[in-house]
Image (spheres, rainbow, N blue to C red):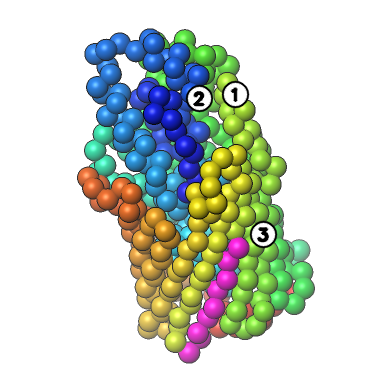
């Protein structure tokens, strides 16, 4: 997860500025000017909300909803945010690794809802959703996706993506995703927010971003992946520049077909303007085990800050996924992060026992 060092006298004090992403925290100079106008009667409530927000800022990237942390499917999240979780193509990976859609044999629709830190005291509802659709065509796979993150009465982030993926050579898939980013702060009728310099040019901002990805099959059982996200590092700041950093994620998946077992390993690096290598990089491991001819799949994943687990059910063209994520920095006063996903394939898609059975 992205992290930024926050000085003790620079944390944003306003409740309506407190969100999971770091960019929702006001700049130090703006925070100092705003603090001079705070009424003492509101200080205790604001400090409680500030503490809750700082806890959320320590959440792992897979449980976040910032623009530089991609929206992932429940299957990928259960495996530690694996960039190569899907077999036989994945329409839900357009924001994670655009190349994953190249393996689709039939049109596919996916829906996911994510309830972050359920029951965490001092924080309103935090919800995230993903809706995607992709279909193979004679020239490659095309798809569209919509992601939405809402912090109740605080922040609304939306992302629309259009993706294209194609199998170019034997064992190599490539894809790109163009994204439209929208961010709006929900300041309501707060009179102090209305006159704050942070919002002198409005409370919302839009930007465009570009992702690219590739997947290469070294053998029938070993696959490598690489994703480049936010290549153009778009600016979504309101009063001052605040660029979404470029992010690189490299992953590998090793399959044991006879055991219906899949192992994944990923490493993600975010090009932050500040922070040590340990703060800007995230290694992860994931495992998926299938039972009853892959009708039931159990998944687990781990990162330095997070443990995840889940189950998947496949009943003909309909698939259901459930994932539970627990962050080690936010253990108390909440029931963890809960994710559910639904997948529907329009047609009889062949099982993908051999990744090298390439298309034209």
Q: Main secondary structure of the magenta part?
A: strand
Q: Earlier in the sequence, mark 3 or mark 1?
A: 3
Q: How many circles with numbers are drawn on the protein? A: 3
Q: Residue at x 44, y 33 (%)?
A: 6
Q: Nearer the viewer, residue 220 or 80?
A: 80
Which residue is label 3 attached to? 213
Q: Say whether residue 225 is magenta.
A: no
Q: Nearer the viewer, mark 3 or mark 1?
A: 1
Label 2, secondary structure: give it. loop
Residues drawn in magenta: 250-258
Residue most toward the bottom?
258
The residue singled out by tag 2 in the image is 27
Specify the quadrant of the image occupied by residue 347.
Answer: bottom right
Element under disc 3: strand
Of residues 10 and 244, the one nearer the viewer is 10
Task: Point out which mark residue 240 bears.
Answer: 1
- Near mark 3 (Cα within 10 A), the count class, few <14, some 14-19 or many ≥20, is many
Looking at the image, which residue is at 48% across and 42% down? 3
Question: Residue 174, how many percent across, how many down?
Answer: 71, 63
Q: Which mark is residue 170?
A: none
Q: Are marks 1 and 2 in contact (CB under 8 Å)?
A: yes
**329 lies left or right of 230:** left
Tell me where residue 356 appears, x and y as whole percent: 66, 81
């Amino acid at each position: 997860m992205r992290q930024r060092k926050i000085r003790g006298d620079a944390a944003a004090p306003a409740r309506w500025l407190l969100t999971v992403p770091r960019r929702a925290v006001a700049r130090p100079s703006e925070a100092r000017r705003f603090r001079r106008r705070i009424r003492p009667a509101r200080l205790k409530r604001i400090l409680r909300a500030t503490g809750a927000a700082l806890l959320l800022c320590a959440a792992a990237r897979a449980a976040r909803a910032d623009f530089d942390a991609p929206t992932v499917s429940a299957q990928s999240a259960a495996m530690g945010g694996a960039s190569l979780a899907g077999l036989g193509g994945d329409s839900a990976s357009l924001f994670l690794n655009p190349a994953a859609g190249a393996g689709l044999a039939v049109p596919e629709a996916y829906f996911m809802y994510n309830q972050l830190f359920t029951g965490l005291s001092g924080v309103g509802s935090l919800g995230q959703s993903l809706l995607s659709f992709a279909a193979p065509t004679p020239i490659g796979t095309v798809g569209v996706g919509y992601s939405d993150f809402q912090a109740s009465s605080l922040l609304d982030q939306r992302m629309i993506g259009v993706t294209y993926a194609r199998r170019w050579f034997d064992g190599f898939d490539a894809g790109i995703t163009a994204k439209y980013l929208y961010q709006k702060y929900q300041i309501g009728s707060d009179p102090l927010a209305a006159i704050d310099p942070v919002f002198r040019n409005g409370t919302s901002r839009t930007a465009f971003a570009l992702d690219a990805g590739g997947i290469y099959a070294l053998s029938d059982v070993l696959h490598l992946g690489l994703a480049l996200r936010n290549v153009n590092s778009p600016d979504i700041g309101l009063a001052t520049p605040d660029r979404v950093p470029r992010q690189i994620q490299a992953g590998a998946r090793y399959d044991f077909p006879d055991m219906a077992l899949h192992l994944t390993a990923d490493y993600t690096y975010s090009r932050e303007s500040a922070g040590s290598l340990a703060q800007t990089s995230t290694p992860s491991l994931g495992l998926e085990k299938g039972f009853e001819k892959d009708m039931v799949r159990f998944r687990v994943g781990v990162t330095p800050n997070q443990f995840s687990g889940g189950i998947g059910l496949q009943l003909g063209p309909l698939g259901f996924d459930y994932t539970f994520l627990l962050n080690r920095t936010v253990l108390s006063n909440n029931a963890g992060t809960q994710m559910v996903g639904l997948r529907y394939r329009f047609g009889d898609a062949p099982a993908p026992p051999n990744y090298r059975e390439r298309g034209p």
